[in-house]
């Protein structure tokens, strides 16, 4: 059954800066009836000396962990920046709207943040389809937008006000093709893609082309649509192809179920995927069926770098859990925006845009960020293996 849409005007919750002194607990995905349309953290809204940023994320819906992780990472960055004096002597706050994982809701949220709330920078979304819907609004209004984790190349092609702090699908597709061919010695790989997801289709195209260029063969390509729960027909066809591996460039919500059904049908080859797998829910949904699978990601909690471990410690203290890559990238996106606002000669959209575009060697927790001429981050990727109900770092692949 389709859930009723939560009106964006349902409610607004204001959290005073003093509330930051209390450690927030990880928020469960709330039901639509109780989900606030917006929340403001980091400073009191309405104060003339408060600089307002905006975030759009999937706080409810099937990909709620993305929105919640992103919200936590951004809030942590805002709190730290305010403790250091804010920007140009003014405190920062962030207004958050729920996209429910739907492009149309993401677009409406972006419009409200721009036209009504008059945010200086727009942060989000995690999913590429949602970011594509938001980017049109931000570009038309001349408001800089930074997506933490949307990897589809088309997102930043929307215009010169659109940026990202993550690598893009052509690199991610290359990474997984190279790993499958060189490290896992796979000759034939089948693909199961979400044909309604820009993210999934984009990764499929690049992986398939690169794997073939490296001497491998794509055994076959099956597809599904977001919301499907029975993948047995596609998996039965794939089993007949006798592949060495199965590339599933989807989100954790689908991958966990696909893994279980694949094993039930006797398809035992390793599953391969991208950063859309990143969530603790993957292990809950996939159980033992996801063991021995691999996916590309933006950072690893096993990285001994002091900056990474310091972020993990602060995140655990604030939210009681280990930050995933979405939280790390959202934290980086917020800090990159804050850094640009500090460097900009004024706080107009054009000045902030120019400052973001000039970013070089920015020390992010998910890797050093250098923005190229397309406003995409050029950075390394890591390969993680699912082992023992958690991820294990395998290797790093440079651009």
Image (tube, rainbow, N blue to C red):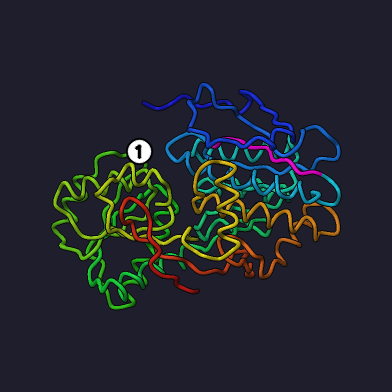
Quarter occupied by residue 50: top right
Task: Place residue 21 in its image quadrant.
Answer: top right
In this view of the protein, which residue sits in the foreground, 300 or 312?
A: 312
Quarter occupied by the N terminus: top left
- Answer left or right for 272 relative to 313: left
Q: Which residue is drawn at 19% across and 50% down?
A: 263
User: Which residue is found at the position 62% from the left and 70% from the top?
Assistant: 372
- Occupied quadrant, residue 39: top right
Q: Residues within 10 Å of mark 1 (few under 14, many from 20)?
A: few
Image coordinates of residue 306 in percent, x first then y, are 59, 63
Where 290 falls versus 48 (above or below)? Answer: below
* Image: magenta residue range: 91-99
Disc count in the image?
1
- The answer to whether 324 appears left or right of 15 in the picture is left
Say above or below: 204 vs 224.
below
| Relative depth, front residue between 28 and 8 | 28
- Residue 95 colored in magenta in the image: yes
Identify the main secondary structure in magenta.
Answer: strand
Q: Position of residue 75 (x, y in %)?
A: 65, 43
The image shows residue 314 at horizontal and vertical percentages of 60, 49
Q: In the image, residue 52 lies at what x, y percent?
A: 75, 42
The residue drawn where x is 56% and y is 58% is 309
Residue 138 located within the stretch drawn in magenta: no
Q: What element carries label 1?
A: loop
The residue tagged 1 is: 227
């Amino acid at each position: 059954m389709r859930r009723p849409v939560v009106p964006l005007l349902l409610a607004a919750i204001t959290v005073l800066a003093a509330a930051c002194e209390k450690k927030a607990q990880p928020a469960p995905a709330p039901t639509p009836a109780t989900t606030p349309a917006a929340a403001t953290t980091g400073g009191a809204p309405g104060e003339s000396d408060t600089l307002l940023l905006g975030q759009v994320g999937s706080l409810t819906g099937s990909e709620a962990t993305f929105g919640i992780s992103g919200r936590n990472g951004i809030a942590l960055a805002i709190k730290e920046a305010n403790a250091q004096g804010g920007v140009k002597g003014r405190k920062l706050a962030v207004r958050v709207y729920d996209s429910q994982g739907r492009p149309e809701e993401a677009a409406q949220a972006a419009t409200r943040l721009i036209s009504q709330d008059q945010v200086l920078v727009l942060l989000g979304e995690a999913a590429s389809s949602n970011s594509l819907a938001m980017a049109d609004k931000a570009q038309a209004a001349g408001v800089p937008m930074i997506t933490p984790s949307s990897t589809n190349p088309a997102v930043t092609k929307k215009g010169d006000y659109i940026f990202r702090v993550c690598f893009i699908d052509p690199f991610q597709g290359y990474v997984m093709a190279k790993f499958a061919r060189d490290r896992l010695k796979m000759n034939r790989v089948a693909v199961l893609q979400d044909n309604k997801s820009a993210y999934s289709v984009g990764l499929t195209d690049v992986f398939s082309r690169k794997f073939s260029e490296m001497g491998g063969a794509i055994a076959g390509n099956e597809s599904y649509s977001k919301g499907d729960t029975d993948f047995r027909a596609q998996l039965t066809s794939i089993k007949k192809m006798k592949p060495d591996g199965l590339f599933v460039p989807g989100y954790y919500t689908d991958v966990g179920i696909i893994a279980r059904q694949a094993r039930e049908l006797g398809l035992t080859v390793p599953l391969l995927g991208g950063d859309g797998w990143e969530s603790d829910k993957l292990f809950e949904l996939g159980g033992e069926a996801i063991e021995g699978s691999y996916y590309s990601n933006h950072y690893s909690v096993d990285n001994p770098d002091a900056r990474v471990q310091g972020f993990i410690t602060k995140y655990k203290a604030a939210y009681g859990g280990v930050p995933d890559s979405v939280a790390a990238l959202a934290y980086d996106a917020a800090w990159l925006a804050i850094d640009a606002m500090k460097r900009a000669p004024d706080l107009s959209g054009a000045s902030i845009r120019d400052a973001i575009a000039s970013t070089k060697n920015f020390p992010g927790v998910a890797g050093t960020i250098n923005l190229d001429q397309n406003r995409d981050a050029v950075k390394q990727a890591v390969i993680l293996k699912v082992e023992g109900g958690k991820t294990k770092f395998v290797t790093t692949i440079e651009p």
